[in-house]
Image (cartoon, rainbow, N blue to C red):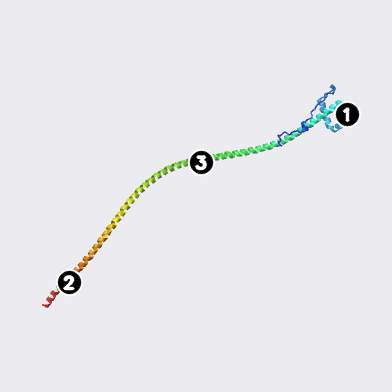
Amino acid sequence: MSPFFKKKDSPAKQAEPQVTMPEPEEESSILSEDEIAHFAADREEASPLVTSINKSHMDKRSLDLVFAVEQVIQARQHAERNIQELQDRLTHSSGHVDRLNREVKALNQVISDREKNILELERKLTDKNLKVDQAMEDYRELQSSLTGEIEELKNAIELEQQKYGSLLQKHNEALADKVKAMNEFEDKLNRLEIENAHLKQKYEAMREEKTYLANMISDFTSRMSAPLGQGKSSS
């Protein structure tokens, strides 16, 4: 139960006895409050004795006085019980308040530590954001630079492709001319080979004819020189 929750009084405590002074029949029966309190204190100290007194032998004034003192004693006892209960509540509440104060102090320390951590995280996050911003700026600059370089490379590649196309065309034309020249050379070589074969045949025929004529001349010379020699030797 919470110490701040007011304890509900019991039915006996709710019906607190009220000190009601009986109406005196005579002015001589009225007592002062000091006399009643003094008498109540004496009656509370000697309560066992008073309770054992037979009230039937008392007169009305004494009965009224006893009744008033009993009410005062009951009210005082009830007040003391209430005071003790309130003191117990106060002690319990004080302990609870001390415990809450310690918890609040601990929570304040935790909150302070968390705030320090949050500040540190915010500082780190700020540094990270600055680094990210710098990285993004560097990336944009690099992208812009690369875009220019890429355009230059595209233009250079396009120019080189045009040069390659021109060179390829020239190469194809030179190759075609070379093939044509080789074909013409082969045709000419074939014609020369044929002519060489014809000339060789002619040479062989002329050599045979020359040999034949040389043999004929030699035979003729031999025939012509033989009689002349024989005539000189006989004379």
Element type at marker 1?
helix
Q: Are marks 1 and 2 in contact (CB under 8 Å)?
A: no
- Residue 189 pos. (x, y %): 28, 59
Q: Residue at x 58, y 39 (%)?
A: 118
Residue 132: assigned label: 3
**Identity of the amino acid at label 2?**
Asp
Q: Residue at x 83, y 28 (%)?
A: 67
Residue 56: assigned label: 1
Q: Report crowding for label 3: few under 14, some 14 to 19, many 20 or more residues within 10 A (C-alpha).
A: few
Quarter residue 35 falls in: top right
Say which of 91 and 136 sits in front.
136
Residue furthest top in the image: 27
Residue 38 visible in the shown view = no
Quadrant where the image shows the C terminus: bottom left
**Identity of the amino acid at label 3?**
Val
Q: Earlier in the sequence, mark 3 or mark 2?
A: 3
